[in-house]
Image (cartoon, rainbow, N blue to C red):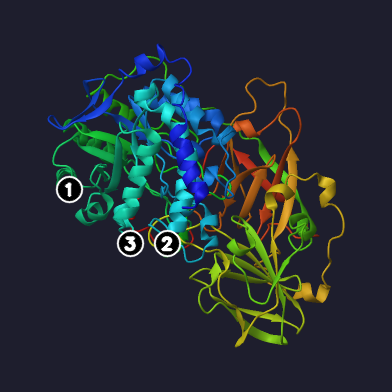
């Protein structure tokens, strides 16, 4: 640590105590009477000296619009929960090194205070790694600027970044701790660390000291690991209370016996009791029967154990936030999880069944449960083609391309999400189909290939590593590469994106690349006149050779109005894409996420009402990557449709049921 680091630590030591939550009665005197501790003699928690058991549910504020935080939290409270559990995704709050975002949708302090106002306690999981089916498990992609970095270890560069980040986050959390008048009763250190290959106790000790330094010596710190002995060998550390996670199919007695091997005394805790499971594109939607979850929850509560239901509401992977698992399979936009509250916050049969189970053990609040929000089918909206990605490069990449002899990764051009266009020329004549190949499976994750504006097909990570193309020597070869979401679990979370190794044409390595990082987010918010102008018209003969299976990646736009005179509009809705294949969609500049009905199981995307307006037309922008349902001059219309019911369990077109991955 340099002089600045020493100065920073000394300055933190001299900072006065952070004030308590506004409105905390009697200030420090009253807060000092608040305690949350473990009673090792009676295997329980003590809250203010009284026996206490939590029944909690997971909600990720990063997956639920701020507009709906109160609605979801109130529904959780009315189900009989006395606590909530939430992750803090580092990359959600520090998108660029040193650039911190804690307002609006990222206002985690407001979210925690809202839970407090509603009488819910909070179990905080600040990582720094969180898994969560979230991009790179919450770790910022910019950590990979040092290519050799060993994540989740004592690597000095990793520790320096963690130290700086937690030095920003944890002081914001300190006044929200229970003993300081807030709702946070326990704080998790790391996440399922026993499932990771590094098994670095020095790293866990570093975190333990850092958490105590910023939060004080009285904070109750814990760990969570799968209920298998090897996981707790690497995931547990003396001084951090070890808990386990398991789902309704597990042997409850055996699972808690595993916890007892690390914690012979103290409360039994299942930190992740799975109410459902995660999805992947191309695999069936995961469901877990209500009666199975309810029966298992009853058995856990009957033992006097503490439990957190993961998830109680799953929510949505808006924009590009979804993660992925290996062998590479990305998770969809919906994180419904078959949870008691649906992705859209709707009450389900599972919600009422679990409420009935909880009622047998704890007092459930009387009164009104907020109903499911009304949904509205706004109908079909016609879209017109704006521009192909190729024609829109001046809008999408104003600084122009980066030139390199060999391909550069997304990280090397400082593009952390979305899309990068890689361009070179064909070094030889390919009048006969010639294989364009990625011998080391270096396309991360999908590349949409065109030669002189003629679509050739798609290369896909691990599954499609070679593609026959045709074109003349000197023709322009474009690969639009999509980052489909970084791996969030296991040893491969250092997931580089883009062309991560060389491509070959026949036996020749392709060189002399122009690399365009695409700023789609700013481009879709630009006024329409910026998009007007020259569009290339490729030679009719060239177009005749194009495969009817593909159209060039292109942007489409349309708008629809919601009458302002009708009470209660706008309402939530769902958007579907009849005839479309795969892409990204924005409404009024808000990035809803990825659609891929051609693969499934998700067909509709959730559209929360707060992004819609009645005062002006609502603008829809679609980036279709593979095949649009309409041609440039054909009679077919490109339409999307707003419906009032979700479809997230369509029969997928490829793949097999997912393996049992720990969450």
Q: Is residue 282 left or right of residue 546?
A: left
Q: Residue 113: percent from the left, percent from the top? A: 46, 25
- The residue carrying pointer 3 sits among few (fewer than 14), some (14 to 19) or many (20 or more) residues within 10 Å by Cα, namely few
- Nearest the viewer among 396 and 598 is 396
The structure residue drawn at horizontal position 44% and vertical position 19%, both measured from the top left corner, is: 117
Judge whether residue 158 can be spotted in this image: yes
Q: In the image, is 104 to the left or to the right of 15?
A: right
Please identify the quarter of the rendering in which residue 28 is found: top left
Tell me if mark 2 has few (under 14), some (14-19) or many (20+) residues whose alpha carbon lies within 10 angstroms of its own.
some
In the displayed structure, would residue 465 be above or below residue 531?
below
> At x 81% / y 51%, what residue is drawn?
531
Question: Which residue is tagged 3?
Answer: 197
Tell me the element at label 3: loop
Instruction: Say whether residue 332 is visible.
Output: no
Q: CA distance from mark 2 to mark 1?
A: 29 Å
In the rendered image, which residue does mark 1 sit on? 258
Query: Whole-percent x and y of residue 632?
Result: 79, 60
Give left or right: position of 495 versus 221.
right
Q: Is residue 104 above or below residue 468?
A: above
Kindly identify which residue carries mark 2. 150
Q: Secondary structure at mark 2?
A: loop
- The single residue placed furthest to the top in the displayed view is 26
Whether residues under marks 2 and 1 lie with C-beta atoms below 8 angstroms apart, the answer is no
**Dividing the picture into quarters, in which one does residue 307 lie?**
top left
Secondary structure, mark 1, is helix
């Amino acid at each position: 640590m340099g002089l600045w680091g020493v100065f920073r630590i000394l300055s933190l030591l001299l900072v006065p105590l952070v004030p308590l939550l506004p409105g905390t009665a009697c200030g420090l005197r009253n807060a000092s009477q608040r305690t949350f501790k473990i009673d090792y003699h009676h295997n329980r928690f003590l809250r203010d000296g009284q026996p206490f058991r939590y029944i909690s549910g997971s909600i990720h504020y990063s997956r639920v619009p701020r507009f709906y935080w109160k609605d979801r939290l109130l529904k959780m409270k009315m189900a009989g929960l006395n606590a909530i559990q939430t992750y803090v995704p580092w990359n959600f709050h520090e998108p660029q090194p040193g650039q911190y975002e804690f307002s609006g949708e990222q206002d985690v302090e407001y979210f925690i205070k809202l839970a407090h106002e509603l009488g819910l306690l909070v179990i905080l999981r600040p990582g720094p790694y969180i898994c969560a089916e979230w991009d790179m498990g919450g770790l910022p992609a910019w950590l990979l600027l040092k290519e050799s970095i060993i994540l989740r270890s004592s690597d000095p560069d990793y520790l320096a970044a963690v130290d700086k980040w937690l030095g920003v986050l944890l002081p914001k959390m300190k006044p929200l701790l229970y003993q300081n008048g807030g709702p946070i009763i326990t704080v998790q250190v790391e996440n399922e660390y026993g499932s990771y290959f590094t098994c670095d106790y020095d790293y866990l000790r570093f975190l333990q000291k850092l958490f105590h330094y910023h939060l004080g010596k009285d904070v109750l710190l814990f760990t969570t690991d799968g209920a298998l002995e090897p996981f707790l060998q690497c995931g547990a550390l003396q001084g951090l209370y070890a808990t386990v996670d398991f789902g309704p199919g597990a042997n409850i007695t055996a699972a808690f016996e595993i916890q007892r091997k690390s914690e012979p005394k103290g409360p039994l805790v299942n930190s992740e009791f799975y109410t459902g499971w995660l999805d992947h594109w191309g695999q069936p939607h995961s469901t877990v029967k209500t009666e199975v979850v309810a029966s298992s929850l009853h058995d856990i509560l009957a033992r006097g154990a503490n439990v957190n239901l993961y998830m109680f509401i799953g929510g949505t992977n808006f924009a590009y936030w979804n993660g992925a698992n290996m062998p590479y399979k990305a998770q969809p936009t919906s994180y419904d999880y078959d949870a008691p509250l649906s992705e859209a916050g709707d009450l389900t049969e599972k919600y009422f069944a679990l409420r009935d189970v909880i009622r047998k053990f704890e007092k459930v609040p009387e009164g009104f449960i907020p109903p499911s929000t009304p949904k509205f089918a706004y109908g079909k909206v016609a879209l017109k083609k704006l521009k192909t990605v190729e024609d829109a490069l001046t809008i999408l990449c104003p600084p122009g391309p980066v030139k390199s002899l060999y391909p550069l990764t997304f990280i090397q051009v400082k593009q952390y999400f979305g899309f990068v266009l890689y361009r070179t020329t064909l070094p030889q004549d390919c009048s006969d189909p010639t294989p364009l190949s990625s011998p080391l499976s270096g396309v991360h994750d999908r590349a949409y290939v065109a030669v002189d504006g003629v679509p050739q097909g798609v290369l896909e990570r691990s599954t499609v590593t070679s593609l026959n193309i045709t074109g003349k020597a000197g023709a322009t070869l474009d690969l639009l590469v999509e980052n489909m979401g970084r791996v969030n679990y296991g040893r491969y979370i250092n997931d580089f994106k883009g062309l991560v190794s060389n491509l070959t044409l026949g036996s020749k390595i392709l060189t002399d690349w122009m690399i365009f990082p695409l700023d789609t987010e700013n481009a879709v918010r630009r006024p329409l006149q910026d998009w007007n102008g020259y569009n290339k018209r490729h030679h009719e003969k060239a177009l005749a050779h194009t495969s009817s299976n593909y159209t060039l990646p292109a942007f489409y736009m349309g708008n629809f109005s919601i009458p302002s005179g009708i009470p209660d509009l706008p309402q939530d809705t769902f958007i579907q894409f009849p005839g479309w294949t795969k892409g990204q969609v924005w409404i009024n500049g808000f990035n809803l996420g990825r659609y891929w009905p051609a693969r499934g199981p998700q067909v509709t995307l959730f559209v929360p009402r707060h992004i819609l307006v009645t005062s002006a037309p609502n603008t829809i922008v679609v980036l279709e990557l593979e095949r649009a349902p309409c041609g440039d001059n054909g009679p077919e219309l490109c339409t999307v449709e707003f419906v009032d019911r979700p479809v997230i369990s369509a029969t997928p077109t490829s793949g097999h049921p997912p393996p049992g991955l720990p969450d």
